[in-house]
Image (tube, rainbow, N blue to C red):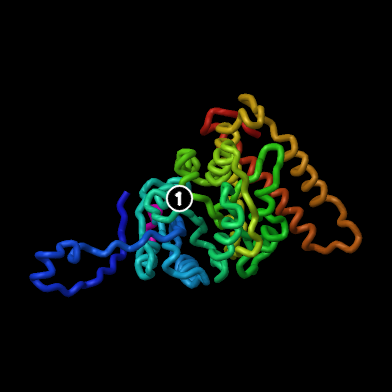
């Protein structure tokens, strides 16, 4: 792992007598470690990274209280060049995958609190102050997750993602049969020592599931997570149908490894059939093909069609994940 640092040195005038009697005066001054390290994995992010960094560097939290680390995850576009134009540290992580990128950021961080967001996000100015304030009210927490809002909804699929809450922190923090509470790392604060204590992010989660896996291992040690709705990050939802389908496919694929790794928690055997998934899929098909209830418009039918597509892509991902990981999750 290669780390590029933007280093600013302070020249100290000295005389021969000072150097002979006070050699320590010529040593480089050590910058105190900030309390917070903001970690931003970035892959092919030239279209959005600058907006993200401008928002993260313009926080109400004093600037000397946090550092910003961009992890370039093998980009071939101008991602690294853009990152180097800001007052941030650039970390190169050639191993592809969001888990490897986040872990590289953790390993190079200096703060006691690690805060995660993504390159396709824009942070509210009070974001870091709100996250840390919520954590400070309960410093025994395993972590804090902020609110994920939609950024400039423009296309039907973006409205659908927002309406169905497919990227909602409060939903992730619900306790469901096969998904205990976890923090979505597009907007999350987790103490660095806890990440290190449980072994860090698992690099096998290359496409999704790395945040749930990490949080569930932290929860196994008795820690809980909290929601900070006032800590807002705006997320660029997938704008096209193709991008949305790839996203759902990756989620389905990542869920296989996640359930396989934590199968004891859920009492899952070598074959797992997610009956609730298929119940919801069938319900979406019936709604899409059937007559609309009185008062509903064509948007409802369009959204039911997106439901059908979402479940189909997720299932395709699970089939691919089952073949890859040697287990059956459908």
Q: Is residue 41 above or below residue 10?
A: above
Quadrant of the rendered image containing residue 11: bottom left
Q: Nearer the viewer, residue 123 or 97?
A: 123
Farthest-out residue, right: 294
Label tally: 1
Above or below, 138 relative to 254: below
Asked whether 260 falls inside the magenta stretch, the response is: no
Q: Residue furthest front?
A: 21
Q: Is residue 75 magenta?
A: yes
Residue density around tag 1, few if under 14, some if 14–19, many if 20 or more, within 10 Å:
many
Most foreground residue, 60 or 91: 60
- Decide which of 41, 44 is in the foreground and name it: 41
Magenta range: 73-78
Residue 202 appears at what percent x and percent y?
A: 47, 40
Q: Can the viewer see residue 320 in this picture?
A: no
- Which residue corresponds to the image point at 63% horizontal and 44% vertical from the top-left? 314
Q: Residue at x 37, y 58 (%)?
A: 76
Position above or below: 102 against 160:
above
Q: Secondary structure at mark 1?
A: helix
Disc 1 designates what residue?
102
- Residue at the image point whose x is 44% and y is 65% from the top: 65
Above or below, 10 relative to 194: below
In the rendered image, residue 106, in percent from the top left (x then y), is placed at 42, 50
Main secondary structure along the magenta-highlighted residues:
loop
Give the farthest residue toward the top.
Answer: 270
């Amino acid at each position: 792992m290669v780390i590029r640092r933007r280093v600013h040195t302070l020249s100290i005038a000295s005389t021969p007598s000072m150097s002979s009697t006070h050699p320590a005066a010529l040593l480089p001054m050590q910058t105190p470690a900030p309390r917070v390290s903001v970690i931003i994995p970035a892959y092919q992010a030239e279209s959005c990274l600058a907006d993200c960094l401008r928002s993260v560097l313009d926080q109400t939290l004093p600037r000397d209280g946090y550092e910003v680390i961009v992890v370039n995850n093998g980009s071939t576009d101008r991602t690294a060049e853009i990152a180097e134009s800001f007052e941030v540290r650039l970390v190169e992580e050639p191993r592809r995958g969001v888990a490897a990128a986040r872990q590289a950021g953790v390993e190079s961080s200096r703060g006691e609190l690690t805060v995660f967001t993504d390159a396709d996000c824009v942070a509210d100015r009070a974001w870091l102050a709100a996250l840390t304030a919520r954590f400070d009210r309960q410093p025994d927490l395993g972590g804090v997750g902020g609110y994920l809002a939609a950024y400039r909804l423009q296309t039907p699929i973006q409205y659908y993602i927002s309406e169905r809450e497919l990227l909602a922190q409060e939903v992730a923090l619900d306790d469901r049969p096969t998904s205990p509470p976890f923090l979505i790392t597009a907007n999350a604060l987790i103490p660095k020592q806890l990440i290190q204590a449980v072994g860090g992010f698992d690099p096998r989660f290359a496409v999704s599931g790395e945040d749930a896996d990490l949080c569930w291992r932290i929860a196994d040690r008795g820690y809980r997570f909290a929601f900070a709705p006032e800590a807002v990050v705006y997320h660029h939802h997938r704008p096209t149908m193709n991008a949305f389908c790839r996203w759902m496919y990756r989620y389905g694929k990542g869920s296989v490894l996640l359930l396989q790794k934590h199968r004891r928690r859920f009492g899952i055997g070598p074959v797992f059939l997610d009956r609730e998934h298929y119940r919801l899929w069938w319900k979406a098909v019936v709604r899409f093909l059937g007559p609309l209830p009185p008062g509903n418009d064509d948007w409802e039918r369009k959204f039911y069609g997106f439901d059908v597509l979402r479940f189909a892509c997720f299932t395709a991902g699970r089939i691919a994940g089952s073949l890859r990981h040697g287990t059956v999750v459908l």
